[in-house]
Image: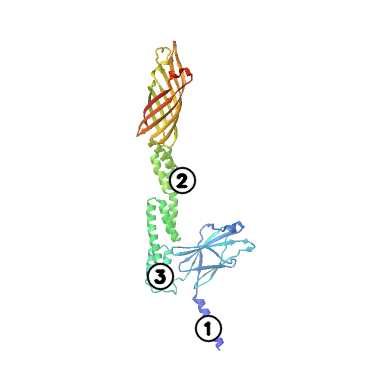
Amino acid sequence: MQKKLFIFLILFVSITSSYAQRNLQVKEKTEGISVFTEKQPEVINAGGAQAGAVISCPLTLSLSFSSNVDKVVDVWKTEVRGELRFYYLRFIIGRFRGASYDGRILEITASGFLPNKFRLNLQPGESKSFEVFDPNATVGVGCFYQNFNEGVELYRKSLYIEAKEKYRTSLECNDIPAEVSVYDRIMIIDSIISWRLRADSCFEASNFKDAINFYQKVAVQNREDFYANTRHSESLYRRSDLCSRYFNSAEEYFANGDYQEAKKLYAIVVDQQCMQAEKADARLVEIRVYERERMEGPTVLCYEIGKNTPLGLSIGLYRIKKIRGYVSVRTNGDFFRSLQSDANDLKRSEFNVSGGLTFGIYNPIWLLMGCGYTEVGKPGDISVDFVPAISPEIGVLGKYKMAVLKYTLQYRFALEKEHQDFVGRFRNVIGLGICF
């Protein structure tokens, strides 16, 4: 009799505990084509194929995994986003090192629930998403979980104000578990509400870069927020359209030399982090260099005066930290008269042309070095004899706003030595001019 009673008690306890446990429900959430990228290099190098699965559940659940083909299910990452905990699983597919990983049956277990088994079919490189939840989350539970679980469900439906009220109600219960932080959930809801408001404001102001960021923040916390996901996609589309229009218009302004208008549009393209941002930034650099060089007044035009050469003109480029060039021409009235056939009363005609390089030493001082050709007219009995010479020169130039002062020292080598004294060895040349 006692033996029968003992067996009856065992059966009663087993059946009672079995009914006391609830069922977990698994729902696939995969959308479109999802690619698994977090593969183990050693498996790839050994010729194996891999796939993945992302399984989410409410924070009130803690899951564990096993399967009929894996010694240990590889859970390579877990994270919490909003009201959900995410498990990232990695699997080997097909045959690998003599073992077959086909026909995988994945078993999900959680404390207080019966195990849930289902066939997990994965293709190489594929990723699938699943949601695990208690279909009877509000049945037969205490005050706290009754309200907390209702808040979770409202949160998933993006009814944040209502979810917040349920969380606050759960805080009034007497059975609050120590491991659940309701205040963190309320803070997340406050953040989401703030992000949505700021995202909408940015969207209306056509600030799609910030709108995308704020909608993305909401979607990270609640992947089922249809409004945030829809607005996020629309913001991406509108930003792309805006970027194309602004960049193309900026290119037209740039080509026409209207750099001020081009700068405004290029700046918007860069600020909105458009696909054309790198090209727009390069254009802005070009414009800044051009404007800086214009402010430097690199082009210099000087009127130059030297002994026997009162008529002189020099033009050149003088830029900071860059090597540029110049050219000068100096002469006198007798040189032009010497070109006439009846010019017999000339005293001394002189012509000099030179050119060289300019070096920025320290703004606003430049050094110039060059070489030239000089021809001095020596009156003869019948005509003018021209004496040639090579004339290297060195000089210094200074700027003050638009005014320019230039000094050049020229040394002359007569090609015929007996004419050296007639040509002269040195010439000091003073120049006054403007820069622009």
Alpha carbon separation for disc pair 1 and 3: 36 Å
Disc 3 packing (10 Å; few <14; some 14–19; many ≥20): many
Q: Which residue is mark 3?
A: 147
The answer to whether residue 123 is seen in the rendering is: no
As drawn, the label of residue 24 is: none
Amino acid beneath label 1: Leu
Name the residue: 43% across, 55% down.
232
Q: Front-most of 2 and 296? A: 296
Marks 3 and 2: which is nearer the front? Answer: 2
Q: Quadrant of residue 97?
A: bottom right
Amino acid beneath label 2: Glu
Q: Residue furthest bottom?
A: 1
Percent position of residue 122, x then y: 57, 61
Question: Which of disc 2 and disc 1 is earlier in sequence?
Answer: 1
| Quadrant, the C terminus | top left
Question: Which of disc 2 and disc 3 is earlier in sequence?
Answer: 3
Percent position of residue 353, x then y: 44, 24
Q: Is residue 273 above or below residue 223?
A: above
As drawn, the label of residue 9 is: 1
Q: Is residue 7 above or below residue 430?
A: below
Alpha carbon separation for disc pair 1 and 2: 77 Å
Alpha carbon separation for disc pair 3 and 2: 51 Å
Q: Front-most of 66 and 240? A: 66
Is there CB contact under 8 Å for labels 3 and 2? no
The answer to whether 35 appears left or right of 319 in the picture is right
Q: Which residue is mark 2?
A: 278
Is there CB contact under 8 Å for labels 1 and 3? no
Percent position of residue 309, x then y: 39, 21
Amino acid beneath label 3: Asn
